[in-house]
Amino acid sequence: MDQSQGNSPLRSGNLALNDGRFADALALYAQAIAAFPALEKALAINITLAQDGLRAAQRLHEMQPHPLSITPTHQLRADPQQAGVWHSTGDDPCFDVTQASGLPLTEGWYLLRMVMDTDVAKKNAKWYLDYGQGLTEDHAASVRYKANEVCTRVLHASALVKSLRFDPLEEPGSFRLHELTCQRLDEAQALQEMLDCIARESLQDAAQTPDQVREAVRQQADSAGKPFADQLLAAYGECMAGVPRRSSYAQWIENVERPGLPSKEQTALLLAAMVHQPLVSVLMPTYNTDPVFLRACIDSVLGQSYPHWELCIADDASPMPHVREILSDYQAKDARIKLCFREQNGHIANASNSALALAVGEFVALLDHDDELAQHALLFVVQAINQTPDAQVLYSDEDKLNTKGERYDVHFKSDWNPDLFFSQNYVSHLGGYRHALLQGIGGFRPGLEGSQDQDLLLRCLHHIKSQQIVHIPQVLYHWRSVEGSTALGAKEKSYTTQAGIKALRDYFASHGPKGVKVGAGLVPNTYKISWPIPKDAPLVSLLIPTRDRKEITEVAVRSILDKTTYPNFEILILDNGSTEPQTLHWFDAIQQQDARVKVLRYDHPFNFSAINNFGAKHARGSILGLVNNDVEIISPDWLTEMVGHANRADVGCVGAKLYYENDSLQHGGVIIGIGGVAGHSHKYAKRHTHGYFARLVLTQTLSAVTAACLVVRKDVYQQVNGLDEKNLAVAFNDIDFCLRVMQAGYRNLWTPHAELYHYESISRGTEDTPEKKLRFQKEVKYMKKKWGNTLDRDPFYSPHLSMEREDFSIASAANSDINQIGMR
């Protein structure tokens, strides 16, 4: 065959291929084949190489930044004197954007990059994508920027973009665009860019790494049943738009509290609907009170929307004459004000008893002489009394007032939480008591100044039931921060910690089991209660499920054996089908080395609930410890601390404080409802931070704790039939178990004094396959169906705290349980 006519294009094509001129090579090969069709088979490999090279070159071209051309279309004019400078003449300036040559915005991910200088204060820009249905906010992407700094914005085009619009400002002003480019990203690049951005812009107390952001978003996506990329894109959009991740207290007051408060007309309707309108005696001891603050305090009582009150003031022999003058002046104006001028100074407890002696109301409320009541404080207290007729003690949320009268540092509280109260007097203000109850215990006890209110409630506890202590989730009390006030800081009254310790020791000496120890907590005005272990310490069976990964499990087991000071425990390693020779060899060795270790074989498909139930049946101990194989002990007395609590008759599950390997918090207890089902308290907080009103360093009742380290009496475990192996094989089995334990009448506790590392799920992996995701969604659906409204309101959290984040931040107006208790 004569190929001379095809040699030239063929040879030229090969040269073009070698030079990387792939389009030229393909054209020349086509010429050669046209002349000699027999060459087509021989050139197949070369053609494929040229095609692949061309696609790669095109892709590389697309992945490079391309400048965008802009055409002003509305409220924009170019500066005639300064090239590149534009002037916005209104609040809606915009450009049409011309797509760069070779870069049509087809479906996919893009990175927009801009550098702009401007003289406006609010540096917000916005991109609009038109898919052929016009420009709408549904397809808008906001971005905040800083002058003369590079700003990037990830965009996702869900279809071919017909037109693109750019709004550089939201107000009149001048600006100069130094750079405006666009480049295509693959999905992995786009996701990483968004993760990095959220991590940089994190406004949480504990900074998040991109990996931590990924895990948090993954959990949110799973709970919401959304694809990960969609959930991340939404979070990224909020971040770029400057949507606050945490609502400020001022925003909460404006957007949640005020709209929820009753008007004058609504107040009248509420009063008319109240079957019982008791007289409330407000007790107020005074001593040398600042005249401005004293008047403000009394005025806050006079301004109450509930009319049936009396103000019982006992002045504790104030040497400053203005106190008597002001008090006498107010008494002359309103007969509901009663006065007692003590001849000798007796401190706050005696003065409070003098005020109590004046009271004739069915209920009393405690008010410090320089603080203020919210306008509807007594109205909501009485409403709560009507809703709970046998209420004996009532308390509300509170905040602080600075010297300018500005409100800050709000404390949104837990419902009645006895162990939290033993650890800190979180009840505090506004405190209300049935008058007969205080008479029965003899009123305030002198000698406990500084913690007289905590002592008062401690002495009440033996005479009332838990359900008779009512929390009103509204800010009814404003605690003024002035020099010498504990509102300003615990160090202002260091003696209060010692007074609290005495009050607690007296309480436990009278009503607690023998051997309870009370000491100072990790921060001022907090306490650590150590519960006794019986002389014959109960046997604890620690259940550790595992499969292979000897290097992980060995760390957990060795740390327990080497560090744990508790004297009586066994370790049951629940082997779920290990096959690695080194793991099996270690199983044999560890059992021979330490008689406390036993390996039990469980050769069935992985089911966390079933494995632990299997272990519980073989456990010899009266107390069970559910422990992950990916933990490592930090505090040697971890088990002593947890068993001390688990041994209490009214306590069910006890959870520990767990950290990630980088010392950020993994588990500070579980809050029901966060993210749809449950979330971890203070997740990712730094190790030594105290948390929301010190809750990270205080033992407390919580709805649930994680089974990564959970201690419970075996009889309680059996009473509720253990973990649900039928419906919750992997996720939420510990949450469901804790809720069933609570349903059975026990309290679940979390203690910060049992610390471990938890290398979370390192041996099992993440929910990263279609099968795992399907199973997880099934378990989410089951939890929501089974527990329903229980997931809507965690009694040990607050309806005013976020259900989207795990940092105890204030909920936004859109997500807060609007403060309309008075309107229900």
Image: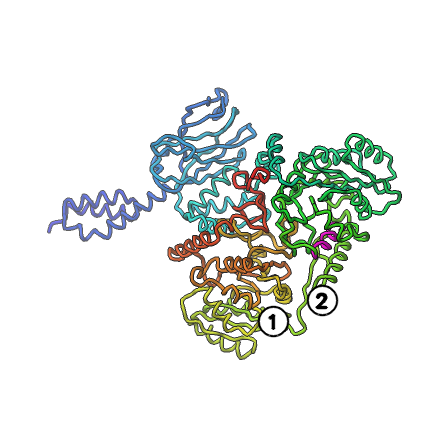
Residue at image mark 2: 514
Q: Is residue 74 left or right of residue 348?
A: left
Q: Look at label 2 and name its amino acid.
A: Lys
Which residue is the site of mark 1?
562
Residue 682 badge: none
Q: Residues within 10 Å of mark 1 (few under 14, many from 20)?
A: few
In this rendering, the answer to whether 234 lies above or below 89 is: below
The image quadrant of residue 322 is top right
Local SS, label 1: helix
Depth check: give the residue in front, 37 or 520: 520
**Residue 299 belongs to the span the image colors magenta:** no
Q: Which residues are magenta?
A: 452-462
Q: Amino acid at mark 1?
A: Asp
Image quadrant assignment for residue 9: top left
The reply to whether residue 214 is visible in this rendering is no
Judged from the image, the secondary structure of the residue bearing numbered disc 2 is: loop
Q: Horizontal placement of 477 versus 654: left or right?
A: right
